[in-house]
Image (tube, rainbow, N blue to C red):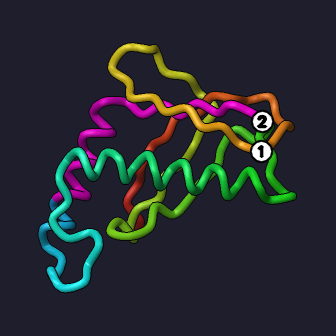
Amino acid sequence: MKTVTIWIANDTFERVIQKIVARSQALPESHNPFYNLSPEQAEEYIWKNIQKEVESYCSSPLANLNERDHAFTFGAPLNDTVFMLTGCELPSHNLHTHTIEVNFNEGKSNSYTADFYALI
């Protein structure tokens, strides 16, 4: 098992939470799992989605954690958003962190910064 730590700067994290909450309030109510998410639910969803993508990537035979840049589509309700994991570490203040245990033993890096981008 390998421990991977994901860092997100506070301002980035808050912007993504606000974007998810705003988008979820604009969705139709009927049968929509993302309808009217609270900020706490949005925060939980961000980490769950990042963890799912990192675990999925690490389970691939082509996974290479020596590469310091990885891009993932975030998915619903932010289908127009990608997040990148980069190998730079941020100072420990003003950060949200999440640790993931993955079944992958290769690679030098165990710490990534997540940043979010809107697709054009």
Q: Position of residue 91 (x, y in %)?
A: 46, 14
Say above or below: 119 vs 69.
below
Q: Position of residue 20 (x, y in %)?
A: 25, 58
Residue at the spot x=18%, y=85% of the render?
30
**Magenta span includes 25:** no
What SS does tag 1 mark? loop
Q: Position of residue 80 (x, y in %)?
A: 38, 69
The numbered mark at residue 70 is: none
Q: Position of residue 98 (x, y in %)?
A: 49, 33
Q: Amino acid at mark 1?
A: Asn
Q: Which residue is mark 2?
A: 1
Q: Which of the two residues, 64 or 37, is positioned nearer the viewer here? A: 37
The 10 Å Cα crowd at callout 2, few under 14, some 14 to 19, many 20 or more, is: few
Decide which of tag 1 and tag 2 comes sooner along the chain: 2
Real-space Cα separation, disc 1 to disc 2, in angstroms: 5 Å
Could you say which quadrant of the image residue 33 lies in? bottom left
Could you say which quadrant of the image residue 43 lies in? top left
What SS does tag 2 mark? loop
Q: Quadrant location of the N terminus? A: top right
**Magenta span includes 13:** yes
Could you say which quadrant of the image residue 100 lies in? top right
Residue at the spot x=37%, y=60% of the render?
118
Residue at the spot x=86%, y=37% of the render?
106
Residue at the spot x=39%, y=50% of the render?
46
Q: Which residue is mark 1?
A: 103
In the displayed orientation, state which residue is furthest to the bottom.
30
Look at the image and give the residue range highlighted in magenta: 1-21
Tell whether label 2 touches label 1 (CB within 8 Å).
yes
Q: Amino acid at mark 2?
A: Met
Say above or below: 112 vs 70.
above
